[in-house]
Amino acid sequence: MKIELLAPAGSYETILAAFQAGADAVYTGGGRFGARAYARNLAEEELLSAIDYAHLHGKKLYLTVNTLIKEEEMKEELYQYLLPYYRQGLDAVIVQDLGVMSWLREVFPDLSLHVSTQAAVTGPKGAHLLEKLGASRVVPARELSLEEIRRIREETDLEIETFVHGALCYSYSGQCLFSSILGGRSGNRGRCAQPCRLPYQLYQNGRRLSAPGQEYLLSPKDICTVDLLPEILAAGVTSLKIEGRMKRAEYTAGVVRIYRKYLDRCLQGRPEKLSKEDRAQLMLLFNRDGFSGGYYRVRNGREMIALSNTKEKERESKEVSVKREALYQEIRKSWMEEKEKEKIKGNLKLFPGAPAILELNCGQAAVTVLGDEVQYARNHPLPGERILQQMKKTGASPFCFEELTLEMEDPVFLPVQSLNRLRREGLEAMEQELLGVWRRKEAKELKKSGEDKTEQAEETKRKKAFFWSALAETAEQLEVLLEEPSLSRIYSGWGCFDRECLAEEAEKYRKIAEEKKKAFYPALPHVVRSGDLKRLEQEIRIFERAGVSGFLVRNLESLGLLEEMGLGSKAVLDSSVYTFNSAAQELVKKFGVAGDTVPAELNFREMRRRENRDSELVVYGRLPLMISAQCLAKTTRGCDKKSGIYQLRDRKGTEFCVKCQCGFCYNIIYNSVPVSLFPELEAAERLGAGGWRLSFTLEGKEETRRVLREFLGAGSGADKKQEETPYTKGHFRRGVE
């Protein structure tokens, strides 16, 4: 399989520069639905032209549709947006949203689906699940090692695309609520405000752990993997992706040029290490306190974080600016001043009394066009050399003559304008011939969009019993929840159990729950990696044998694992497995799952457009803003392999609690205050949700009891009173961009 060098582009100029510098394909965004909403992006005519340009030169173009898409956007808007690109021959779309994947497969069946890294695919089980949905390529989570990538490639038929250069997100694959909760700009909707690039301090028990001058704790360095290319290819990666759709054209061309050089040498069997000169150029184009090799060889580490933010210092350096501008000028001169042209072969036939004939060939494509009648030259015959010279003037067309032959009988005459018209018609015919194979005429008929589900919700609310549920992340919270009679369903995080005596604990808690007439659901880890699968499968079997009601699922890998184990019907999807629209809801129902959770980034009006009968609404809980493979403890004081609680303080003094989960090696950064919909319970009731959930994360026993009394008392008709504690309504009223 051909190895692809894939470049980013935020403008038409950048697309041309990327191709001319050696990219095999480009990914770009249009006016809607891309994860870089603040990039310049391409207008429709520019994008249509770019698709043609790519195909004329044997390249490919992929369109980003990699955001979560709301119900009102899902069908008519998305359909009308994609239809002209589909007809033009767009090669693939890059998607995150499960509903969008399912819908695209139905409406645009010939369009290849590439699953975005923002889907957070962390292993072969989740990848296989997406493969069954019709995906042809997956971009795994950027946190995966080469061995984990290799396993996905070996256990599926999916193409693998991975990032080889550019920026990293601190949160797993960019699935982050930090920007949306604090500023109303959703990273999952392409509008991230990048709070990870701001300074923070880390504390534990009042003691500061972060050093002065090293406060950019959440800001990963850009990656540079030229020296890892042989290993990346050996892992089965077929598309090498450069990040940077927000960058200028000179950056893209400069990076592509260097990766093209080293990739070609690698493919020729003579890989080379990155030279000092080329490394210096990459650094000059852009860096954050240097480069790292990403996660390909390491799980995390201090060396991956741009603690001192050298990038900001470089902005103030006149010397650096002068050097960068000189490099930009060199790149513009070498790779951007002239458009690449396709080489064609031609044969011109000029015989008096017959029409002029121009035969053109480009690869396997061939066309023949007829011109005006050739005349005998009585006074001013056209010499063959002049004829050929005139015909080779291809101007702004995408072609140039590699070879042009002439068959003629002297003396002949044909007006210059006739020669020009013949050449123009010939080149146009060749262009249409080459592009015609890419054109699509038909798409499936669009079905009627989803309607407001409010009335239906009211009806289903009367038909289906409503229940209260609660989630515990600690053993002491679990003890409190099990004693509460109003709770019908208990979710219990992995931190509640002693994994060394799991069988006994599973049986104990399941029995207690059964005696208290409660359904009991272990909550699977937030992140599951390939190395976790064997043990996790064993532990799930232990819970199954104990007779638990089901499992709360927080990622695609866990869902794929349960599906493979024949336990898909026992899965309840947490809000991190996004069912942002009705198409996603319909899809997960086909998986046979028992229910889902209303996504945290939907507001009340948007929730009303959902069918919520089989969904739970989280009415209380501290939202996980980020889940990261990085470890703040390791970044600051070093890893002691002990789980713990830390405080992350921003420049305004706000503190965010950080839970270090050593068992699965990830950090959870929680919001500074919990979401509480206590003041909105009457409105929430109109949504017709199957249940309401209280999510406990950091609370102690007494705080857990207080919240239970507050909410369950209101739910039973008691006086509605909320203690004056800090809280947020999340997105219930304000929504996100």
Image (cartoon, grey):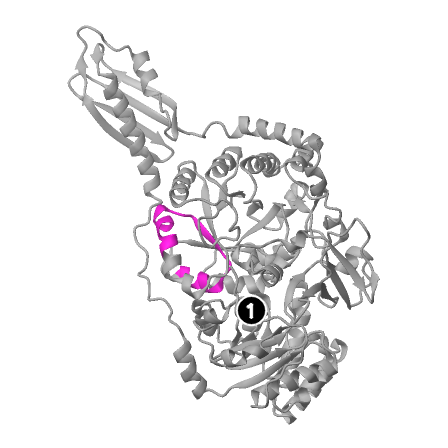
Element assignment for label 1 = loop
- The image shows residue 678, relative to residue 483, as above or below, that is above
Specify the segment rendered in magenta. 80-105
Farthest bottom residue?
Answer: 515
Is residue 594 visible in this depiction of the protein? no
Dominant SS of magenta comes to helix
Q: Residue sitting at 83 percent across and 65 percent down?
A: 206
Q: Residue sitting at 21 percent across and 12 percent down?
A: 412
Q: Nearer the viewer, residue 663 or 100?
A: 100
The percent position of residue 623, horizontal first and vertical second, equals: 63, 69
The percent position of residue 144, horizontal first and vertical second, equals: 65, 56
Q: Horizontally, is 702 left or right of 674 in the view?
A: right
User: Is residue 97 inside the magenta stretch?
Assistant: yes
The percent position of residue 173, horizontal first and vertical second, equals: 60, 57
Q: Which residue is denoted by mark 1 in the rendering? A: 600
Q: Horizontally, is 598 left or right of 353 in the view?
A: right
Q: Residues within 10 Å of mark 1 (few under 14, many from 20)?
A: many
Is residue 685 visible in this depiction of the protein? yes
What kind of residue is marked 1? Ala
Q: Horizontally, is 334 left or right of 640 in the view?
A: left
